[in-house]
Amino acid sequence: MSQTDFDPRIVRTRQLITDAFIELSSQKEFKQITIKDITTNANINRATFYYHFKDIYDLLETVLADVLMINLKQEAYQKEELDEEEMVQLFIAITNFQRSLSQRCHRGYEETIARIIKDQLSVIFIKKLTIQYPNEPESTIHSMATMLSWGLYGASVEWRNGNQTLSPEEYIRKSVSYLLYGFGIDK
Amino acid sequence: MSQTDFDPRIVRTRQLITDAFIELSSQKEFKQITIKDITTNANINRATFYYHFKDIYDLLETVLADVLMINLKQEAYQKEELDEEEMVQLFIAITNFQRSLSQRCHRGYEETIARIIKDQLSVIFIKKLTIQYPNEPESTIHSMATMLSWGLYGASVEWRNGNQTLSPEEYIRKSVSYLLYGFGIDK
DNA sequence: TTATTTATGTTGGATATACAACATTCAAAC
DNA sequence: GTTTGAATGTTGTATATCCAACATAAATAA
């Protein structure tokens, strides 16, 4: 964080944008939210949005990292194909978040947070699947990405609600192996 | 209202200032509130306050007129001495406000509003009494102004709580005559 | 498929808001 | 009463936010 990030104007504007995004996430799916929706809701100029964020994906990652304190930045998951190791790391990031959820003040809108997390997982998986299966129609790619992101998130909820005798890694590694094998990862 | 008053920056900043003033009014008397208090509470620069308002008295009148919708601007009560007609007009302005209070969403902080109104009445009366009694010590002037403002406001509350068979003017004119007579208005 | 509308990303210029500094006034401390 | 500190009002400069406009892409309508 640079010094200018303490400028009250910047702080206020970022808060407006973030609040708008979260509110819209409770009403719509990520792919239905437009920059225009956000800036209208926040009552700021569109150029101002671009002063602060590169695009809506940048906003999504910032909200996850800075507001929800969960590391799901794309740059941390750069391998082009689905990979067991990366999926385990994704799962650990989510369970870290789940672990802290009971101590946090966000419990009131957990459903919105869940949606935001799944949206980002979906963004990550779509990117990988598009590269790995260039000839698959987009609808198939989206469908697979949705199943993966919901599955991974659901597993983290189950892990949290259980007695947590297994570490996240132990809990998920077998499932991930089966998942990837089902994708013909051994071709 | 000029076109620039729809500029979102202006709207937001004015809201921040107004909210800060109202919050501080619930904690302190008017004369204890400083510009610095307001700008700190609102998290804006002091120069920005002065961009919008001439001074704290300007803010007070604006809050009354624009937020609480009650006309107690000094410029409407310019006679230098206490005057029966002006006091009746003051009372009518307050009772107009009281009349609408039951239909408004401000009921939750009526005490703060009462304080703000009394503060402005006090400002008006201090100005007149200072001119009328130049040799009286300031503490006396303040004391008289306080009694007048509380008295006038209290009468409006009583009027509102009664069955309102009398118009505001009928209700207050006799009392005002007695008040002014007690000030030696007939010298 | 074509035409129209909407959204995105960008750019140059205007302006509201920020900052620091200053002079003066007022209030508090000694 | 004197000194010190805080508050007020002001000013010049920097910058975050605003606006309109443009080119392009994407979505929708015909």
Image (cartoon, coloured by chain):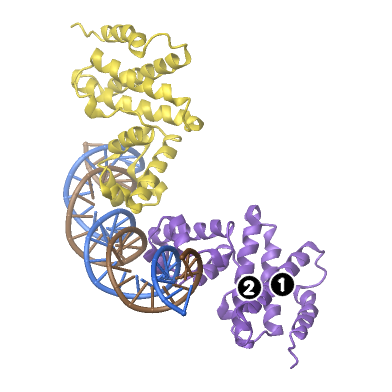
Chain colours: A yellow, B purple, C brown, D blue
Image-based side of C19 in relation to B38, left or right: left
Placement of A147 over or under A123, stated as above or below: above
Q: Point out the tag, 1 or 2, that comes first from the N-terminus.
A: 2
Q: Residue at left 54%, top 58%?
A: B24
Measured Cα–Cα span from mark 1 to mark 2: 9 Å
What quarter of the picture does the C terminus of chain B occupy? Answer: bottom right
Question: In x, y percent, where is residue A170?
Answer: 34, 8
Query: Which circle marks residue B121 in the picture?
Result: 2
Q: Nearer the viewer, residue A115 or A86?
A: A86
Residue B80 seen in the current view: no
Residue A19's quadrant in the figure? top left
Chain of the residue that carries numbered disc 1 in the rendered image: B
Question: In x, y percent, where is residue A129?
Answer: 24, 20
Q: Nearer the viewer, residue B68 or B81?
A: B81
Dot 2 crowding, Cα within 10 Å, few <14, some 14–19, many 20+: many
Task: Find disc 1 in the rendering and name its residue.
Answer: B152
Q: Residue at left 59%, top 74%?
A: B123
Residue B23's quadrant in the figure? bottom right
Chain of the residue that carries numbered disc 2 in the rendered image: B
User: What is the three-letter code of the residue carrying label 1?
Assistant: Leu
